[in-house]
Each structure stands twice: as structure tokens, then as C-alpha cells.
Amino acid sequence: MNSWFSVDCNKTTADSPSRAFLSSINMEVLEISLEGSLVRVNSPVISSGCSGRGSNIAINMTGSRFAFSSSNSFAAMGCNNRASLTQIKPEIVGCTSTCDANNLTSSSTGGKGSCYCSGNNCCQTTIPSNLQVFNASLETTGYPNDQGRNQCKVAFIAEREWLLDNIKSPEAVQHLQHVPAILNWFVYNDDIPEGEENSDAMKCSPPLRLITSRWGLSTVTLYSNSITCSCNPGYNGNPYLLDGCTDIDQCKIPKENWCPGMTRCVNVPGMYKCELDKAKITFLILGAAAGFLLLLFGIWRLYKLVRKRKNIELKKNCFKRNGGLLLQQQLSSSDGSIQKTKIFTSKELEKATDGFNDNRILGQGGQGTVYKGMVADGRIVAVKKSKLVDEEQLEEFINEVVILSQVNHRNVVKLLGCCLETEVPLLVYEFIPNGNLFEYIHDHKEEFEFSWEMRLRIATEVAGALSYLHSAASIPIYHRDIKSTNILLDEKFKAKVSDFGTSRSIAIDQTHLTTHVQGTFGYLDPEYFQSSQFTAKSDVYSFGVVLAELLSGQKPISYERSEERRSLAIHFILLMEENRILDILDERLVEQDREEQVIAVANLARKCLNLNGRNRPTMREVAIELEQIRLSKGALHAQQSSKELENIRDEAPNLWEIYC
């Protein structure tokens, strides 16, 4: 190497221990990492207005082989302190710390996470990539002569982890002269001493290997030729020295080798090998092969004898355990539509899903796992493999078969068949290729424009499907788990309502009381949560949350909002009451010039989210209003009064009083 990497050991006094310094940049070394190309050093603390401190020392590593790592932070402490890095033009980096009148001494209340500078008497920010200069200016903001405020101000660059773990209050660093910081170091091909241009170590050739270019194309060409090296597996040492990597004799280290009892370890450069005793191995292989063939023949004979009886018993037991008798009972009481459902064999579905291979998994949920497959007629299907379930969950499985077999709607996922002869029950659906609505709302994809027209159409389609389930189906069906992840999108991005595992078919004159509340937090009807009485209006509430998602692009539950507004439904209603709907609107919709339609849908969502279920519209009313918004561009509905809505309710069937 050359003088850039020279380390001197100095003593401040005769009795003090020696300290290591990088002589090229005059910084004390705390730790060196060859593998990470990092060096931990003491970085100076720059101060202003602090008694008992020496003069400030700036750092200038320009042209050296060192630069501050991005794992550092620039931090400043003190009352009304505006700190900024200098000599880094055209970039501007800095932060401002203020003083809370009720808390002048500490910027944290305890705990590792809260010790990080947050702006109260302490602030921090990131530093530019590959920074080689450190100097800072400290300025006073506000009223510097306020009584009771400490005028001592400091600024420094420190390792972020150290700052997080060690700084308990601003006063903790005001007496420090230095703080730990991380430097990246790098080696150029030009750093190789003359005469060693073909050195294996410096060119990272065997037994060394090149790991990566250290700085990439995003920085100036100063770093474009830097290299990082390490010893190959089976070698250790310093890869930056000529012949610095030496072979490890794994045979002398028991933990580094393993050879069976009939072999011995032989060390070779970079690895080891096990030599075999050929005669013993041959005898062992022949004996094992003969024994294995005899055992295999006996197993095969036994298998042929019991296979037929075992398969019959297994299928019979699986059929009973998976609710076959319950399904037969449901069949006998249905109108015959369920008989159109195909009964698949387990062999068909295993072949379709490549043995239920993990790479065929489309998704996993509370009721089971969904696999993608292709059946014999070439159709792409989704196979839902339920978990091992108890009797109550088996009832939910059979319930889903019966419900989906009765449903015939273009916006409801179609059930193609089922299989009951396997260890766990299986359902076969049509395959919906474009994922679920949640992904398109919350996972922004630059290549795909999720337009307002598409959102409004999807909302209208889902509302139509739910209206059909509530009122147009042969028996009213309540979904009970409406959410954006249960709304799938087909190849034309048309909505398909899915996951009927918790749905219920309800007679017109019945209500439905549950022993435990089912649903998804954030979409759950508060009235149902309190009373355990599920009604058609509970589905309306959940659909209102989906409308709020489509409008805002925000998740139903967010811990980034205050505790009072953590629920999107509550947050949405409060903004509507404050006439601030544009504050919650998804930024992707702002430029689409659909204000009238957006406001109309927002007003409809607010009605759906009414805490009193009786005051919510029915799904039929919701579907009609959404369709009218699409046709009228929203102007009529944005101005519709509550009195007009009551007139619509009086004219529509009295479905909002149906409870399940």
C-alpha cells in the first residue's frame, strides 16, 4: 500500500496508552473493517457559546482515500440552533433545533427509539454521499437572550447507531470533544506499489476475488476505479497485501471438515477432500443394494395387497371428515343449482397444481392457501386448499360451496367445483389474473394509471354484486367480510367479489346473532361489533370503507395518523364534517378534473359510514346512486340533499331492516 493508509501510534503522556491515528488525515482510529472497507474514527465536535471548550477543528479529506459513510448523521444540539454544513456547495445540508418551554433539558422521554434527535433541543439529518469535508456554521434563531436557556450549541457528524444508543439528552455531548464516525476507505489500482502491478492480491485475482465496485456511477469519477477485495473461501488473511491470503488447513480444524468413517480428510488449496477406501465401499454398496432390493420388493408386494382397501377407506373417511354428509344435506334442501358444480378428484387437482407446489401459491389467508393450476380442459383455475379445520370451520367450508353454487353474477367469483376426498377440503374457482384491489390502491405502480374512471367503475361493479347478493339472489346472502383484498380484478380489470368463507344465507324474516364477531379490523361495522347482530347494513358499512380507500388511497388502519383518527372511516367522516374532503383525496386523482364525481362519491361513502345502521342506504340504493354518478358526471349527486335521499329510501324495498 502507500502512505494514505499509514497508521501511527502516539502517546499523549508517558503513562497513557498508545492511540492509533491515520497520519494522512490526522484522525484517531477506533476500529478497522477489512471486509466492509470501513474505519471507525473520532470525529470532532464543533461548538459555539460553550465554556471550557477548545477551538473548533474542521476536517478536510479532499483528495484522500477516505470519505464519510452514509451510515453517519449530521446532528446539532442547543436552544434555537440552526446548524449547517459548509464548503459543500452547491448542496445545502442542515437542521434546526428549537426549545420547548416546558422541556428545556431533554429531547427524549426514555427508551431507545425516543433518544433519537427529533427537533426539540436536538436535530439531525443525513449527509451527502461521499462527503470528504466537515465544517459547520452555528447560528442562533428566535430570541437568543431568553432567560434560562443554555446558549451552548454544538454540531457534529456521528455514527447513526451510536447516536441512537448513547445520546440521552443534549447535555450528554456538550462536554465531548469527539464522537465516533464511520469512514469509507477505498483502494485504486494506482495505489499498487511500482513493480507489483501483477500482484494477485491487489488485482483481486485467485486466491482473491473481486467483490464490487465501491462507489458506482452515481458519484464523481474520483471513485470509479476503486476496488474492494476479500480472500476466497478456504483462505484467510489480509487481501490487500502481496500473498496476504494463506490457505486454511481444514483437516486440522474438526469443525471445518466432515468425512464419513470410511474416508479420510486430505487438504487441498482452498478446500479439503475425503478419500475413500474403495474395497470397503464396494462391499458396503453391494450389500446395501441387495438389502434395499429385497426390502423394496417386500414393500411393493404389501402395498399391492392393501392399496385397494386403504384407498377406499381413506376416501370414505375424508369425505365424512370434510363435511360430505353436511354437503349432501345442503344438496337435498337446495333448488338444484349446486348440482352443476363439478366434483374433482384429488389426482386431477394434484396434477393441475404440480403437486401443490409452493411456486404455484397465489395467496394465503385465514381459511387456507390458494394455488394456481390448469385443469385437463385447459382452463386456468384457482384451487383453495383449506386448513385442517374443526366442525365449526367445516360448516363454513360447506357454507361457501352452497353459497357460491347459488350465485350467478358477472362480478362474483365463479365456483367451478370442489374435492372432498383429500385430507383437507378443496374448492376450485375461476382464475382472476390481475390480483386484488388493495394492491392497486396502496402499491403505486408507475407503469399503471389507476384512474378515477376505473375506480368509479370498480366501485359500481362491487356495489351491484352486493346488491344482487342482498336482494336479487334466491336467498339473501350477506358477505360479512367486504374489504379491498377480497375484491379481485380480471384480465379486463373488472371487479370480482371473492372469499365467502364467513358469508351467511338468511331467510327474509330472520336475523342473525353470532357467538363471536367475524370480520377484518378497519372494515368492521361498529354496530355489529357492539351487538353481535349482523345485518345487510353491516356490509354497507364495510363497502363505505372501501369507497374511502378508493378516494383517499389510504389504508383502513394507519398508525401514522393520530389515535383518534387511526381508523380511516373516522378520519374520513371528520374531514367531511370539516368540509376538507380535498385534504384526504388521493394525489393521483387531483389532476384528473373529476371534482363533482369525487364529491358525490364522498357524500355517498359518508352515508354508508353512518354509525346508525338504519340511517345507511341499502346496497341497492348505493348501486343505483353510483351508476347515476357515472352517467351524470356527479353534478346531481354532489348537490343531493338528505331529504332527497330519504325519498329514495322510501321508494326502495325495505331491505336495510334485514338482519342476519
Image (cartoon, rainbow, N blue to C red):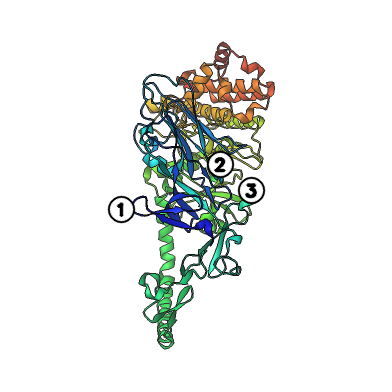
Q: Give the amino acid at mark 2.
A: Pro
Is any part of residue 329 visible from this angle? no
Is residue 536 placed above or below 420 in the rendered structure?
A: above
Residue 125, x across and y down, in percent: 50, 36
Q: Give the amino acid at mark 1.
A: Asp
Residue 378, x across and y down, in percent: 64, 54
Give the CA separation, mark 2 to mark 3: 13 Å
Is any part of residue 465 visible from this angle? yes
Front position among marks 3 and 1: 1
Give the left or right position of residue 205, taking residue 634 as reference: left
Give the CA separation, mark 2 to mark 1: 40 Å
The residue indicated by pointer 1 is 15
Q: In what element is the residue under mark 2?
A: loop
Residue 635, x across and y down, in percent: 66, 17
Is residue 420 placed above or below 443 in the rendered structure?
A: below
Q: Give the amino acid at mark 3.
A: Val
Give the left or right position of residue 630, taking residue 577 as reference: right
Residue 166, x across and y down, in percent: 37, 41
Q: In what element is the residue under mark 1?
A: loop
Q: Earlier in the sequence, mark 2 or mark 1?
A: 1
Q: Residues within 10 Å of mark 3 (few under 14, many from 20)?
A: few
Q: Residues within 10 Å of mark 1 (few under 14, many from 20)?
A: few
The residue indicated by pointer 2 is 128
**Which mark, by number, is residue 276?**
none
**Which mark, by number, is residue 220?**
3
